[in-house]
Image: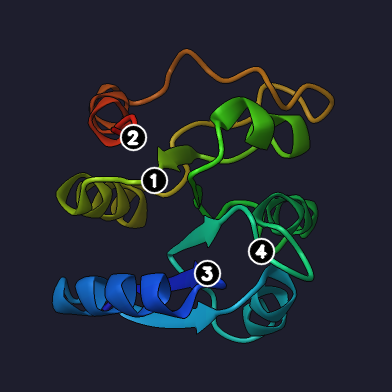
Amino acid sequence: MKLVLFVEDEYGNAEVLRLLLEAEGYRVVHAANGRDALALLSGERPAVILSDFMMPHMTGGELGQAVRAAPALRDIPFVLLSGTQESVVRATFKDYDAFVAKPYSADSLLKLLAHLAASGRPQPLLSAGDREERSEEMDFSLRQLLRGIEIPPD
């Protein structure tokens, strides 16, 4: 059973997604903010980290930076979930593996999660100094999944 670390400060959102992930067969560990998530990462290693962006104490972007800076954690797929525009997120943190705009399709999110949990990070960084550039080798099926997830709000 694959472990997913889910980081979300809003209890209702966290509970719904936890139940959804557990129904799909994942073991879920929840943290209410990035600081708590880092403490949990000193224990078991998750297959994927799903993190909200806007949180108290430490944002999802700051958590992502800390994960990528830690040699033992940097290869864990990192997915940011946010109602904030992706351009705002990218101003803080660029080295995520997928951005999921809220509201999102649960089915598409589960497909993305299954893909990342099975295959790991989809592409390596081209250089440590340029985190914006992504490999052109990005898996086609992952790109198709990401297109289905970015649902604009009504």
The amino acid type, in three-letter code, at marker 3 is Glu
> Where does the image place residue 45, in percent across and percent down from the top left?
54, 75
The reply to whether residue 70 is visible in this rendering is yes
* Amino acid at circle 2: Pro
Q: Residues within 10 Å of mark 2 (few under 14, many from 20)?
A: few
Query: Residue drawn at (58%, 20%), measured in percent from left and top?
Result: 134
Amino acid under disc 4: Met
* Comparing labels 4 and 2, the label whose residue is closer to the camera: 2
The Cα–Cα distance between marks 1 and 2, rounded to whole angstroms, is: 7 Å
Amino acid type of the residue that numbered disc 1 sits on in the rendered structure: Lys
Q: Which residue is mark 3?
A: 8
The span from disc 1 to disc 4 (Cα, nearest Å) is 15 Å
Q: Residue furthest front?
A: 154
Q: Which mark is residue 153?
A: 2
Q: Which residue is tagged 1? A: 102
- Quick check: can you spot residue 26? no
Residue 66 x, y percent position in the rendering: 78, 58
Q: Dividing the image into 4 quarters, which one contains the N terminus?
A: bottom left
Earlier in the chain: of badge 4 and badge 2, it is: 4
Task: Name the residue located 47 percent from the left edge and 13 percent from the top edge.
Answer: 136
Label 4 belongs to which residue?
55
